[in-house]
Amino acid sequence: MPLIDLANPTRFLALSARILPWLAAATLAAFAVGIHLGINAPDDYQQGATVKIMFIHVPAAWLAMASWTVMTIAALGTLVWRHPLADVAAKAAAPLGCAFTAMCLITGMLWGRPMWGTYWVWDGRLTSVLVLFLMYLGVLALWRTVDDPSRAARAAAVLTLVGAINLPIIKFSVDWWATLHQPASVLRLGGPAIHGSLLSPLLVMALAFLLLFLTLHLAAMRNEIMRRRVRTMMMLQAEAAGR
Amino acid sequence: MTAFAILLLRDMRLAVRQGGGALIGVLFFLIVVTLMPFAIGPDLALLARIGPAILWLGALLASLLALDRLIAADYEDGSLDLILMARTPLELALLAKALAHWLTTGLPLVLATPLLGLLLNLDPRATGAVALTLLAGTPALTFIGLAGAALTVALRRGGLLIAVLVLPLTVPVLIFGVAASNAAIVGPLPFGTPFTILVALTLMSAVIGPFAAAAALRHGLE
């Protein structure tokens, strides 16, 4: 089946209905393995068991940025390639990214209180992630304010593309500005700076979060397609009743 | 159900729907509070000291946001004429609309205050004091804003004009709100003194606002 067939919503619904149970099972399995590895990982010599907040905080941060990247690609799909399902993908990804960003901020605050002595500090990394959170809320507000789905899609696509500038700022903020936050420890020149016993639970949890995002995203896309069908049917019904 | 309750529920339902702007006030509040450290600098001690003032200013600006749609939306689709012609006293109907506006715009600001207090490094006692003063003071902002909205209902670019008209009248509320917050945190003054005056301002504006708005509508919509 060529890739273009996925652009047909009905084919997409059929295919996603077949994939979704497997994805969900894979997500649960990955979480089970990740949590098991995380619980059995050794304590940090300095932070003790608190370091294990990292296994939730870091994957949530990665997924928060990945969600905006997915939305950016979908925005290009809407504006440039006119892909029929691109705006559905963008609308479905926005609440997920917002939730991951909130999770990242909250777990970070809870980690910062015992480690740094404060819930919040206005440095480059934390501020740019807070700005990302505000941009997610802005995109969600824009989706809900414009009535017509396709006009809302184009407006949200433009906003998403403009906001994509924040992603490299977040990634390099720990290098550009003096900060309390840990500098890049995994994706850096010279390889990861974390010991393998803590790195492997982290990577498994990251995979689990990614599978979670894919599962929820696919399910949300299905819901959005059906929501639009219901809306069209209601409009047709109202028109028929008026005649 | 009384006409008051019907109007109250109608306005609340409209506010939470598409394009109603119920939670956008909270988002604006969050953005304003986030902008302050960019301008002031990240010094946490300074932010904690002026935290109540930042929160009060943010809440004041955010509660002005939906005011221009408060009466103008009804004017545009004709519901205002029905409200004017109804048997319910106009003052009561406007009180219902203002109450609905506060419940959907002002109250969420109060509920968002603890989170923003964390961002500004306020301790729980300070955050609680600010939240309490906001709870007592934001209704006053809405009732005073109601009068401003009624004055500019027929204008097309009413938004900023409402702010210009309403903000000077809200200065006493701001003064006593911040004074009460600081009294709870630092001051020699007991918390009750400015807080009681703040509650009095709210109660007064709950009466004066709808009466002024009704007079403005009756004379302005000739």
Image: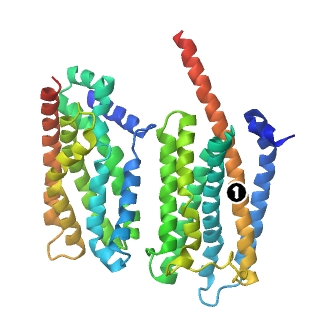
Dividing the picture into quadrants, the one containing residue B177 is bottom left
Of residue A182 and residue A57, the one placed in the foreground of this image is A182
Three-letter amino acid code at disc 1?
Leu
The residue furthest bottom is: A45
Question: Residue A209's spot in the image, x, y percent?
Answer: 69, 62
Q: Nearer the viewer, residue B52 or B180?
A: B52
Residue for point 54% across, 45% down: A156
Q: Residues within 10 Å of mark 1 (few under 14, many from 20)?
A: many
Q: Is residue B87 visible?
A: no
Is A2 or A91 nearer to us in this picture?
A2
Q: Residue at x 16, y 56 (%)?
A: B171
Determine the chain carrying the residue at label 1: A
Residue A138, image x and y in percent?
48, 51
User: To which quarter of the image does residue A81 belong?
Assistant: top right
Label 1's element?
helix
Residue A127 is situated, as x and y percent measured from the top left of the image, at 47, 69
Residue at point 61%, 26% (across, down): A232
Q: Give the quadrant of residue B110.
A: bottom left
Left or right of A119: which side holds B1? left
Q: Residue at x 38, y 38 (%)?
A: B15
- In the rendered structure, the answer to whether residue A117 lies left or right of residue A240 reads left
Left/right placement of residue B187 relative to residue B46 reads left
- Residue B39: image location, x then y, percent: 34, 69
As drawn, which residue projects farthest toward the front? A80
- From the viewer's perspective, is residue B206 above or below residue B124? above
Please name the residue that numbered disc 1 is placed on: A212
- Looking at the rendering, in which quadrant would you find the N terminus of chain B? top left
Taking the image as drawn, is residue B172 in sight?
Answer: yes
Q: Quadrant of the C terminus of chain B?
A: top left
Q: Is residue A165 above or below residue A221?
A: below
